[in-house]
Amino acid sequence: MKKRYVFYCVIFVFIGIALYAFFIEPKRIVTHHYTLGNNDGQKPVKVVQLSDIHIQEKYPVAQLEKIVTKVNNEQPDIILFTGDLFDHYAKYGPIDEVIAALSRLSAPLGKYAVWGNHDYGGGATRVYPDILAAADFQLLENSGANVSLPDGKSVYIGGLDDSLLGNSSIDETLAARQSDYTILLSHEPDKADELIDHDIQLIVSGHSHGGQVKLPFVTIKNVLAEKYFEGFYTLANDTTLYVNTGLGTTKIPARFRVPPEIAVFDLYI
């Protein structure tokens, strides 16, 4: 009788975990706040990073609307999107609704994005630039922008092309840089090892999903997200890397112990 009781308890636990992983955690959105730089009395620049939304039937535009509301509540100065808008555009790609939602994201100093590998796959390459342009995002493809700040300083926001399916070039990306502080967007975080000699203060990435399903003794990693996996890393030459664990899912519509993330940085420049 005792063994049967333990057996049923174990079954109920596994069923509970599965229900949570497939139906609850993927819809949770956790906002993480971080402070970078030295506060010498200046006003910080508030930067919001979004990554790996992976819009699909299991993560539709209604969930994107929740993301937009949460981001706008933060009142960011700058919004950065580090790639993978759709999971598989050819299977599910509601263009007009996505443009309408992304257009409602508000950031007075600009909205910037880069390519992710899923933005090249599934037919998305034909529509991704047009969607971003219609939603007032600047797509950085081995390019960047010097952004003037209210205090007279400026920050350079550079974006690499995707390192798996694109043709990333750091020299092209930084060619127009005229600012002392640089934020670099790179969808794949392991690319950071090639960037540390270029006087970059902050690199923001995604792609890893933090493993998406985190189990004891099991770590699922993506190509070019094997060394740098989630959160902050202090690299050589005073370069900081942040790996965002993303908002959506891919392969399986589940998350466990890695809830969808919005990252908010107060930068003291």
Image (cartoon, rainbow, N blue to C red):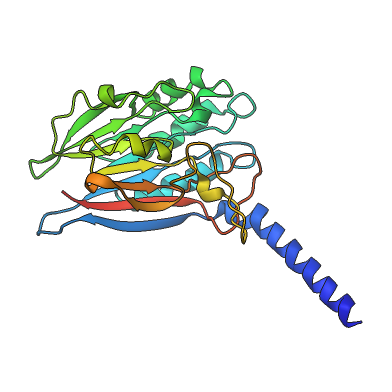
Evaluate whether residue 106 shows in this view.
no
Residue 19 shown left or right of residue 160 in the figure: right
**Residue at 46% from the left image edge and 47% from the top image edge:** 67
Residue 81 position (above or below residue 231):
above
Q: Residue furthest bottom?
A: 2
**Residue at 10% from the left image edge and 59% from the top image edge:** 40
Evaluate whether residue 142 shows in this view.
yes
What quarter of the picture does the N terminus occupy? bottom right
Residue placed most toward the observer, 217 or 104: 217
Residue 118 position (above or below residue 1):
above
**Residue at 60% from the left image edge and 36% from the top image edge:** 56
Residue placed most toward the observer, 85 or 116: 116
**Residue at 57% from the left image edge and 28% from the top image edge:** 93
Residue 157 position (above or below residue 6):
above
Residue 154 percent location from the top left of the image: 14, 38
Residue 262 shown left or right of residue 1 in the figure: left
Residue 115 shown left or right of residue 42 in the figure: right
Residue 70 percent location from the top left of the image: 41, 51
Residue 78 percent location from the top left of the image: 28, 41
Residue 214 shown left or right of residue 107 in the figure: right
